[in-house]
Image (spheres, grey):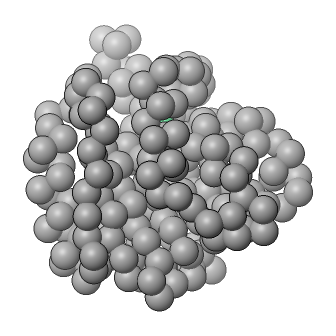
Amino acid sequence: MIKQKLFANFAHPQGLLGRFAGRIMATKRSNRERGAWAVGELDVAPDARVLEVGYGPGVTIAQLASGMTGGRIVGVDRSDVMLAQAQRRNKRAVASGNVELRVGDAQQLDVDLTDFDLILGINVWQFWTDQTATITALADRLSAGGRLAVVYMQPPTGKTTGEEARSKMQDQFERAGLSEINVRTMAFDPPAVMMIGHR
Ligand SMILES: C[S@@+](CC[C@H](N)C(=O)[O-])C[C@H]1O[C@@H](n2cnc3c(N)ncnc32)[C@H](O)[C@@H]1O
């Protein structure tokens, strides 16, 4: 029962259990390594405009911010508990204006969030109620040539395997009109897949 409640807090961290889930996300080795792998694979330009949806405790935001010089990173997560943890973790970058963190829904982004060189979502795709519509809407927020990258690793309670996610995402990226679609796989146990498409 408590385990189920804790797992639900990875989808939408709230209250005390949400804070605990955030701590697990921030410290679990596989989680940190997956974020670092995705950032490394994407080879983000130091002056890029980046949006991360579902930033959780903000570990990937920090990894992205450490390589940026003139760029800007915006994060959107639906959890105010995650906002607090991500703000603490990225205090200096937020204060400098290089990083902006918001509470919001990746499925219904604020209108001003547009023209990104890269939009990244790590282990958040599985929570979208209409994945094709969300991917299409995110693709619309990219600059010409911008990239959408969606990462998935089957969670302990998740039914969708990495292979199933890969096939669904491929179809969703194609329907969204993205081009040069390619997939990267990290040999975790279970493997992590990252689908990348260009506008
Ligand atoms: C499993 S956590 C992953 C966090 C982080 N990306 C990581 O890999 O550690 C999922 C996060 O996505 C957020 N989330 C889920 N659905 C969302 C949505 N529709 N819009 C914005 N954030 C969402 C949750 O609040 C949670 O912080």
- Image check: 28 left or right of 95? left
Q: Quadrant of the N terminus?
A: top left
- Image check: 165 left or right of 147? left
Residue at 25% from the left image edge and 24% from the top image edge: 189
Q: Quadrant of the C terminus?
A: bottom left
Identity of the residue furthest to the bottom in this view: 144
Return the x and y of residue 147 as percentages of the image width and height. 43, 71
In-front residue for pair 159/192: 192
Q: Quadrant of residue 2?
A: top left
Q: Quadrant of residue 74?
A: bottom right
Q: Quadrant of residue 130?
A: bottom left
Q: Is residue 147 above or below residue 154?
A: below
In-front residue for pair 33/109: 33
Residue at 56% from the left image edge and 80% from the top image edge: 114
Return the x and y of residue 163 as percentages of the image width and height. 12, 44
Residue at 47% from the left image edge and 57% from the top image edge: 42
Q: Is residue 47 above or below residue 52?
A: below
Q: Is residue 148 above or below residue 194?
A: below
